[in-house]
Amino acid sequence: MRVISRCLSSARAHTGRPVTAPLLKPTETSTPALAGVHSTKPQYFLSYAVLGAIVPFVSVLLAERGLSRQQIGNVWAVSSLGVIFTPILVTLLADSAIAARVLMAGLFALAGLFLALLAPAAGFWPILALYALHTFALQPIFPLQDGVHFAAQALRRGRGLAEAPYHTVRVWGSVGYIVPGAVLYFFLKPGAAMTPVLVCGIACCAAGVVYALFFLPRTPPPPRDVAHARLPTLAAARAIGERHVLIFCAAMFLLHAASQAYYQFYPIHLTERAGIDKRWVGLIANVGVVIEIFFMLAFGRLVRWLTLRRVMYVGALAIAVRMLLLAVVSNAYVAVGVQLAHGLAVLVIHVAPPIFLDARASDRYRNSMQGLYTMAFAGAGKVVGAFASGWVAQRSLPLTFALSAGVCLLATGMFYFAFEERRHET
């Protein structure tokens, strides 16, 4: 754990000219309060390593345990319900009562426990319950760590120091996602059980407990004035309710719903339609994540070149093209080639929204802003997309991808109305 922490903390952040505060500012040497292991980079590495160990393989694992495509969709949908309820409750606690690092440690512990119980589970209902409980525990970690990162940057800003751009920290999540898939390639043998997937996920959760408790930055608590201390979620709701912010969030709802078809059934597409062995699934997923790293490091330049609004256009269209290719072509080379769009997809779905929202958040409800968005739009989109894509995939997997492509095109059009700066551009 100490080796990982030192390696990640010593990595140099990407630099670039500032575009907007707090979006893009050059980095500098850390102050003692945030130096060394006191960084959020390893936290992102470990949280996404849990995803990298489980998500690329879970649909294949469920299919091997006898679940139908519709049942696989139902497992994804029910497990996504946690994204609706748990992040907002946990981020409210982080804004009002309990330190975020303590909450994250407890959540990592629960996520690992439910993976351990999932290993011997058999039958639809036990598998559904245990995988759902795992995701219920894991999902609140992501808005919490975003809140910790932005709080640390606000502290630096208040001291007149340069900030670490979000994308240069979030990229360590992409690195973390890659590692388990590369390791599991050597442990997943043809015809053998997929137990190594669960063991890897449990190990990553255990490392997350240790790092969250002992190495995360200890950021100051939010202001506790009378007007906002009782319910920061209400203030966050008012901010999201602004017309252009609400349109942005609604478009993101559609993108999350459409993307569920990819996350749920791309592994099935690889193994059943493209004829690729299951041991390659993790490595193929990593092809996209490696590309994602380069896009993430270039995010600042892309925003300066295109503006954030146009990045959203291009990314949403890239997702649509990827879905359309999966719908009409079953060739193995094309199945792997669609990973070229993954970098833009991640920028649009995972990098841009926290930045867009944090620019409209106050210190009083910074965590709650991320949690409310995760609940009402990202989480709800995942649930709706999971149920819908599972129902359609039971009848036709290509049709699932084709309908998802159409939803992405609708979201692209909505982004035109989501950016106020559009009116000032020539």
Image (tube, grey):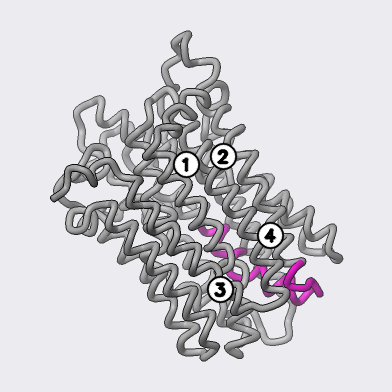
Q: Position of residue 264 (x, y in %)?
A: 62, 67
Crowding at mark 3 (Cα within 10 Å: few <14, some 14-19, many 20+)? many
**Mark 2–mark 4 CB contact (< 8 Å):** no
Query: Which mark, by number, is residue 104?
Result: 2
Residue 176 horizontal side relative to residue 267, left or right: left
Which of the two discs, 3 and 2, labels the residue nearer the N terminus?
A: 2
Which of the two discs, 2 and 1, labels the residue nearer the N terminus?
A: 2
Give, as a single range, the part of the protein colored magenta: 48-70
Residue at 65% of width from left, 57% of height from top? 202
Q: CA distance from mark 3 to mark 4?
A: 14 Å
Q: Secondary structure at mark 4?
A: helix
Query: Which mark, by number, is residue 145?
Result: 1
- In this rendering, the answer to whether 70 lies above or below 157 is below
- Depth check, mark 3 against mark 2: the one in front is 3
Q: Amino acid at mark 3?
A: Phe
Crowding at mark 1 (Cα within 10 Å: few <14, some 14-19, many 20+)? many
Residue identifier under label 3? 401
Q: Is residue 289 visible?
A: no
> Which one is nearer the viewer's eye here, 254 or 117?
254
- In this rendering, the answer to whether 300 lies above or below 263 is above
> Which one is nearer the viewer's eye here, 211 or 325?
325
Which of the two discs, 3 and 4, labels the residue nearer the N terminus?
A: 4
